[in-house]
Image (cartoon, rainbow, N blue to C red):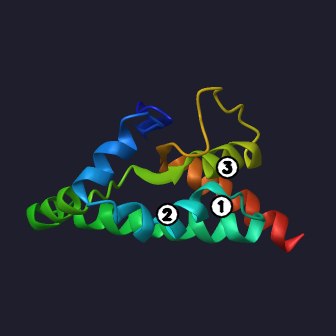
Amino acid sequence: MNKPIMKIVAGPSPTQSGISDAATAGLGSVMSAASKAADVIAHDDDGLLQILHYRKQVAIAAKRRSRWFGGRLYNKMTGEDPDYIPISGTHLRQTFSIINFDAPDFIVASGQYQLRTDFAEEAVDALQKKRSA
């Protein structure tokens, strides 16, 4: 596969929260606090397996939809990508650790990234083997 292993969607920025607070009248941070906390906190192997497995299934569905125009349009509107899964910096570091891949230094816990699906599949396989052992 000639695609990059990962993509940076959003990293921490001093202006990022100011813009989002202005757009949502300050309520955005309250509404998404639990979601952001779940992404920043490291999970155990079972929790990481659930996250990776679910997001891998979403990518599989996006790949199936990408075969026809309406499906590609749906993927574009929802931001689903058949080749990448969305993942937080914390979970990306954990995933790289599982597959014995050195994580780049620029990955931060609160950043948002996309990981190529074949790396996610490798991590899911490794976690399932570890779980059954």
From the image, tell me which residue sits under label 2.
56
Above or below residue 15? Residue 39 is below
Q: Given this view, does label 3 or label 1 mark the residue nearer the observer?
A: 3
Above or below residue 59? Residue 106 is above
Q: Given this view, does label 2 or label 3 mark the residue nearer the observer?
A: 3
- At label 2, the amino acid type is Lys
From the image, tell me which residue sits under label 1.
124
Name the element at disc 3. Answer: helix
Locate residue 14 relative to residue 36 in the image: left or right. left
For residue 44, which quarter of the picture?
A: bottom right
Locate residue 73 relative to residue 26 in the image: left or right. left
State the residue in front, 69 or 8. 8
* Relative image position of residue 62 (x, y in whole percent): 31, 63
Which residue is found at the position 53% from the left and 49% from the top? Answer: 118
CA–CA distance between discs 2 and 3? 13 Å
State the residue in front, 42 or 71. 42
CA–CA distance between discs 1 and 2? 9 Å
- At label 1, the amino acid type is Val
Locate residue 18 relative to residue 124 in the image: left or right. left
User: Furthest residue to the right?
Assistant: 133
Name the element at disc 1. Answer: helix
Q: Which mark is residue 95?
A: 3
Q: Are marks 1 and 2 in contact (CB under 8 Å)?
A: yes
- At label 3, the amino acid type is Thr
State the residue in front, 99 or 41. 41
Which of the two discs, 3 and 1, labels the residue nearer the N terminus?
3
Quadrant where the C terminus lies?
A: bottom right
Q: Around disc 3, counting alpha carbons within 10 Å, would you say few (fewer than 14), some (14 to 19), or many (20 or more)?
A: many
